[in-house]
Image (tube, grey):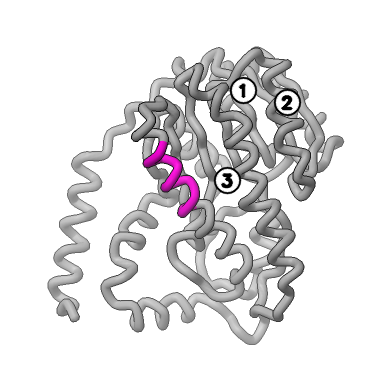
């Protein structure tokens, strides 16, 4: 086992190197006129991404389950400066939805530069209760629909040398309590899209894959689920949305928000027993 003093020293060196080498190379002009398909756009982080893309002058197709909310988001996007905005209501629990959505975007925009996969299915924040059917449904929404959307869009993104932006979670890198099914879907995203990145490189396909690892974000849904159950601060959805957009535009391999999650992921295997104790200390078992 590595002595704690050496571990802290190594952690300090990693932080210093990250600070030294990290540069904000994002150019807002690179988004102007970009053709974007954004899923999960009716609320939360997806809604905030829609507004950021609009301020940068993108052409956007929005999709989510709730058409009434999409209409409102679309109207605000136009006010904020989006060059074009369309929406299509779709439920990603349906295997037919991904192809329909991609074809709609292609018809409206004439191509794609950025595919942003952001939607998630609702899931309880509680101990595993043996509900295999819910896990199967959640895999369809959170994982299989991502695979289907990416597969349908890859030929289009290859033509434009575009970006595939996959919104994931810290729970897809480090397991946490009360997220068994959700965590499984996020680990699956990392496995599939990291493998796909290898294959695209080997095939000399110039499509960037950016995996976005997020911590606890202050969306209404996340705050409602974790209230009185998690002892940690939530970070602003608007900032998370901007970090995702910047990562996709600069063709980053991975994006971590907040930034310190990257350090946490680097250190995750050093002290597994102590790590698990620390993680569990942030959760209130009695109210889960």
Question: Which residue sits at x=65%, y=69%?
Answer: 227
Marked residue nearer the N-terminal end (1 or 2): 1
- Residue 74 image point, x, y percent: 75, 26
Outermost residue toward the right? 68
**Residue 200, image quadrant:** top left
Measuring from the top left, give residue 226's x and y in whole percent: 64, 68
Q: Quadrant of residue 153?
A: top right
Q: CA distance from mark 1 to mark 3?
A: 16 Å
Dot 1 and dot 2 residues touching (CB under 8 Å): yes
Where, quadrant-wise, is the N terminus in this rendering?
bottom left
267 lies left or right of 157? left
Q: Secondary structure at mark 1?
A: helix
Q: What residue did someone put label 3 on?
A: 237
**Against 108, is 259 above or below?**
below
Main SS, magenta region, reads helix
Foreground pick, 167 / 238: 167
Q: Give the SS element for disc 2.
A: helix
Is the Cβ of the residue at disc 3 closer than 8 Å to that at disc 2?
no
User: Residue pushed farthest front?
Assistant: 203
* Residue 54, numbered circle: 1
Tell me which residue sits at (64%, 33%) in the image.
Answer: 38
- Residue 40 spot, x, y in % from top left: 69, 41
Which mark, residue 76?
A: 2
Magenta highlight range: 190-199
Which numbered circle lies on residue 287? none
Dot 3 crowding, Cα within 10 Å, few <14, some 14–19, many 20+: many
Residue 17 vs 210, above or below: the answer is below
Query: Quick check: 91 above or below 225?
Result: above
């Amino acid at each position: 086992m590595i002595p704690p003093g050496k571990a802290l020293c190594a952690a300090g060196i990693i932080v210093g190197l990250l600070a030294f080498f990290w540069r904000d190379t994002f150019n807002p002009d690179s988004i102007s006129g970009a053709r974007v398909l954004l899923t999960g756009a009716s609320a939360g982080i997806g809604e905030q991404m829609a507004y950021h893309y609009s301020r940068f002058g993108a052409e956007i197709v929005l999709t989510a389950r709730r058409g009434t909310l999409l209409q409102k988001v679309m109207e605000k996007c136009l006010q904020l400066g989006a060059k074009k905005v369309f929406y299509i209501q779709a439920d990603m629990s349906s295997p037919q939805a991904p192809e329909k959505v991609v074809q709609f975007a292609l018809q409206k925009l004439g191509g794609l530069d950025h595919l942003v996969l952001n939607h998630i299915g609702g899931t309880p924040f509680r101990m595993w209760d043996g509900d295999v059917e819910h896990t199967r449904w959640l895999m369809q929404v959170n994982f299989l629909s991502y695979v289907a959307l990416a597969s349908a869009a890859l030929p289009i993104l290859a033509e434009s040398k575009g970006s595939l932006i996959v919104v994931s979670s810290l729970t897809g890198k480090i397991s946490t309590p009360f997220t068994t099914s959700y965590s499984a879907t996020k680990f699956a995203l990392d496995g599939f899209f990291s493998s796909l990145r290898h294959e695209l490189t080997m095939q000399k396909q110039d499509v960037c894959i950016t995996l976005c690892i997020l911590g606890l974000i202050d969306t209404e849904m996340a705050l409602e689920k974790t209230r009185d159950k998690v002892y940690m601060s939530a970070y602003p959805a608007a900032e998370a949305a901007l970090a995702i957009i910047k990562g996709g535009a600069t063709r980053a391999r991975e994006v971590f928000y907040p930034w310190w999650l990257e350090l946490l992921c680097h250190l995750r295997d050093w002290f597994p027993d102590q790590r698990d104790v620390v993680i569990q200390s942030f959760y209130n078992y009695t109210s889960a």
